[in-house]
Amino acid sequence: MDRMDEEAEMFGPPKYFVNGFLFSVHDDNSQLEVRRYGKCFYITMARENFVDSPSITQQYLDYLAAERSDVTDDDTMVEDYNPEDFYAWALDPCLPLFENLAPTPKQNLKITLHDFLHPEVFCFSLRAVDGELTPVQSEGIRHARVPPGFELDDSAFSPAWPSFLPTEIEICITNPEDAISASPNKVLVDGKTICFFKRYRSGDTDIALRELENYKRITESNLDPDVRICRLLGVVKDEENLFFGLLLTYVECDFQTLACAAGPDTPTSAKQKWVNQVTGILTQLHKAGIVWGDAKPDNVLIDKNDDAWIIDFGGGHTRGFVEREKAGTIEGDLQGLEKTVEYVFSKRAE
């Protein structure tokens, strides 16, 4: 067995996917959301759960402090902290439960967007029992429907946009291990069209309305269809008219943005090509009366043909690229473009 085989055997495919971590600033409670083969696990933790083991209590508080400092970005940030260490500490004791309640499927797993949005949910609390971390069933096994969508007035949508049910949308799974997390970014709509699914959650109403309004302008404009921007191909709503998100042009780019493509070894000719392309796309958007909004390198994708695409019409601004007072204006776009060009050719990229 060579070294690569040994490493593959040591690490192997992922056994679960951490979909979220929540904690309170008012107490020492926290919760991990874990996905595995279409099932969802909520693992709650609290200081009082570990009182029987001072060492476990201290480990938990140290990990929690590191997570807090990482998020708040304050002066107490813990150096060399790796969230994966915390996840392994908390979730390795749960592996037998995961494997029992969400076993590896015997055949290719088909997961729809409905399955992802409304998974079967299992709730456990992590406790110290006889000096060992032990998951304890806290709310029983239940099939829970977490309300992930929200209602919007019909006027928010263009009649030109088709609407699809979550049951009509299949999550694209390329490799067997992808089924563990089944992230709903790349989806197959109605068995025919591959799209990028941009999800909106409860509380995102204002952002969604702003982006929908911008896509209305794009739909109603005379913008050339060859302009490389993500187009709105449809919206996702259920039978109760709850809105879940947008179906957008899927750009084959392996998640490469201009921010990471313009690296130290990237030829100057390639950087100049991308800058010229972004400038040309933005000029056409402005001629059509459309504002980009959050103009920055992270909102430019570089596709498999090495061409630049502008994405994200949700508005907002990013400090260092667009001033708050100029956000949502052509002037703000031009400022963001100037800062993007500086970034591409700056020492950070060189």
Image: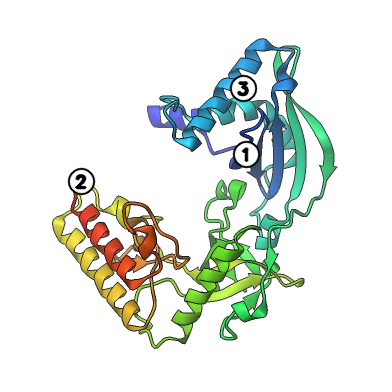
Mark with earlier residue (2, 3): 3
Crowding at mark 1 (Cα within 10 Å: few <14, some 14-19, many 20+): few
Q: Please determine whether, in this image, residue 38 is positioned above or below residue 193.
A: above
Q: Is residue 218 visible?
A: yes
Query: Could you tell whether 85 is left or right of 222 in the image?
Result: right
Q: Are marks 2 and 1 in contact (CB under 8 Å)?
A: no
Taking the spot 63% from the left edge, 57% from the top edge, the residue there is 203
Q: Position of residue 291 (x, y in %)?
A: 38, 73
Q: In what element is the residue under mark 3?
A: helix
Q: Is residue 323 above or below residue 12?
A: below
Read off the residue under disc 2.
264
Considering the numbered disc 1 on the image, is that residue within a helix, a strand or a loop?
Answer: strand
Q: Amino acid at mark 3?
A: Tyr
Q: Nearer the viewer, residue 227 or 71?
A: 71
Q: Residue at x 52, y 56 (%)?
A: 174
Residue 60 numbered tag: 3
Q: Residue at x 47, y 86 (%)?
A: 220
Q: Which residue is mark 1?
A: 22
Looking at the image, tell me whether mark 1 or mark 3 is earlier in sequence order.
1
Determine crowd level at label 3: few under 14, some 14-19, many 20+ residues with C-alpha closer than 10 A.
many
Calculate the distance from the C-alpha at mark 1 to the C-alpha at mark 3. Answer: 14 Å
Q: Closer to the camera, 54 or 72?
A: 72
In the image, residue 188 lies at what x, y percent?
Answer: 57, 67
Tell me the amino acid under the disc marked 1.
Answer: Leu
Residue 186 pos. (x, y %): 52, 61
